[in-house]
Image (spheres, rainbow, N blue to C red):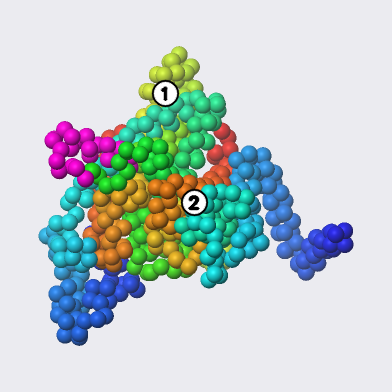
Amino acid sequence: MLILSFNFLLFRVMPGDIEFVLIGKTVTPETADELRKYYGLDQPLPVQFLVYLKQTFTGELGTSISYRAGVPVEDLLGPYMLRTFVLVGLGTAIAIFAGVIFGRAAAWRRGTAFDRVGGTFFLIFYCIPTFLFALVLLTLFVRYIPGWPTHGEFSDEYYNMDFLGKVWDRTIHVLLPLFALVIESIAAFSIITRSALVDVLTEEYMVTAVAKGLRGRQVLKNHAMPNAMLPVVTVVAMNVGWILGGAIMIEVIFSYQGLGYLTYMAVFAYDYPLLQAVFMLEAVAVVVANFIADITLFRLDPRLKI
Amino acid sequence: MSKLKSRIEFILKYVPLLIWGLLNERQQERARMLYRSGTKTWKQFRGNLGGMFGLYVFVFFLAMAILAPWLSTHDDPNSPTWARTNPVYAPPSLDYLFGTDYNGKDVYSLTVWGARASLLVGILASLISIVIGTSVGIAAGFFGKISDEVLMRVTDFFLVLPWFPLMIVLAALMGRSFNNVIIVIGITSWPSTARIVRAQVMSVKEMGFVERARAIGATDFHVIRKHISPNVFPLIFANTILLIANSIFSEAFLDFFGLGDPDVISWGMMLEEAYNYSAFSSFAWWWILAPGGCIVLLIVAFYLIGDALDEIFNPRLRKR
């Protein structure tokens, strides 16, 4: 609800005048009035806000004004959303899994060469902007593996393929963006896991566990991991926005037609209704992710009670 | 040469003395304490390998930004006749250290000039976000009750909003200009600072010396200025450095997205052009590697400095 209001206000208050963009300068005053009425801009702000709320809850997100002009935004979004969901969902799942494993290994061998080399490596990857990494990846693939698809989400002959061919085609197209996303997020997750685990491992009950005669693996699995997972879950949830940002860049670079690519197009076409809708979706996605993280925390940590 | 040296020595010797003479006794005492704690921090910092590496890299880039007009080997990129006659897509050579781009611009000179934009945006944007974050944090933590409730809800709200999309939307709505990039980054990155400051303020507020100050009739403003701020500052210091790293990251991202100022040379802009003019298909790796490498180096440097400072100012971490 708050997001909706903010979203509405942001697009009304900001200096890049929405009216100016929607209507344009070259039209006659009568046409301008007509258009203003069509977009509902002739009403006072509170009325506009109510109308906006009603439309949002009934699934009308306005009309796209440039990119495939005249198409209702909600009809446009579906396939893009699905593509981004596949990319980000799959990427995050793999990255969490791999990141936790790497982080666990590094924390367990803390101070050894493995930890240092891995730590430096991940720190550098953590600091590489996603778009830069994707760009380098793209350059290398175009040069050294010429046949590898680096563009779009299916090839030109897609519609002539049989079912299996189609599946394969889509998979191979999604692999490269997915790889870029996963590498970037693995770095972040493994750093978080490592520091959380190191925190837990230096606690005194770890010494107790070892003194009881438990083997290292058991200590790690049964005593350290459950406690270390709590901060990891929190930080992962906070990083969802970050991952989404990374996905935007990756989608733009690999021309993968997801929400990020749509954002890019909307920004450059000054398509504010579309931009507004996409931004709302992204905000809602992050809120939902945070909500899921909270629920997971409650399940993981018996101390938390409402 | 030796004359210059002796002159510098003279200045180094007598200017501090002059300033020292101008201070009154209380200020002298404070300056002495500042100097002592400064040298202590510096000693700890020097022991930190990563932090020192980061500092060297930072100084290197700072020098690069300041000395850009003398370091660039080809004419000033801001001049209109820039690079008319140079070869296009030339690989690195002695003449063009990092090669040339689609327009025949010398990538090395562009990279040198780009350091200015990155550092400027990084520092100014984090300054804005520190100012907003600290004020919000202190107001929320110190006054408590309703102002805390309201301000923290606002902070949470900004914390939850997806950061990159928000930046894109704001930058797109505000238009392409250098100042706007700084403002956008500044107003999207303050919530974490506000959280940290609030937590610290709340714990400092309960300490004995605040109560003592209150008992002898100190005003809110006085307590905040004299007792709260000095205790919050070290925490923010490390955070600021990390914020600068983030701001540089964001600036490169916005520029790459085509939302930066087209007239200002920056590393993000160079990468955007490299992407738009298909540097990847003509394998102009120097065009991507030069600005990209600089971005990564600078960000890594700030992270390392921030980490080192965090370790010094945050005693909980030092045990390990």
In the picture, residue A267 is in which quadrant? bottom left
Quarter of the figure with the C terminus of chain A: top left
Q: Measured along the vertical axis of the image, is residue A34 above or below residue A215?
A: below
The answer to whether marks 2 and 1 sit on the same chain is no
Residue sitting at x 49%, y 31%: A118
**Dot 2 amino acid type:** Trp
- Identify the residue position indicated by label 2 in the image: B287
Please report, as a chain letter, where disc 2 is located.
B
Q: Which residue occupies the extreme bottom position in the image?
A: A29
Residue A272 screen position, x and y as percent: 26, 66
> Across the whole image, how many numbered discs are drawn on residues?
2
Question: Which residues fall within the magenta stretch?
Answer: A156-177
Q: Which residue occupies the extreme top position in the image?
A: A213
Please report, as a chain letter, where disc 1 is located.
A
Residue B236 screen position, x and y as percent: 53, 54
Any part of residue B202 in sight? no
- Identify the residue position indicated by label 1 in the image: A220
B73 with respect to A29 (left or right): right
**Dot 1 amino acid type:** Leu
Residue A194 screen position, x and y as percent: 45, 33
Any part of residue A54 in sight? yes
Residue sitting at x 15%, y 38%: A161
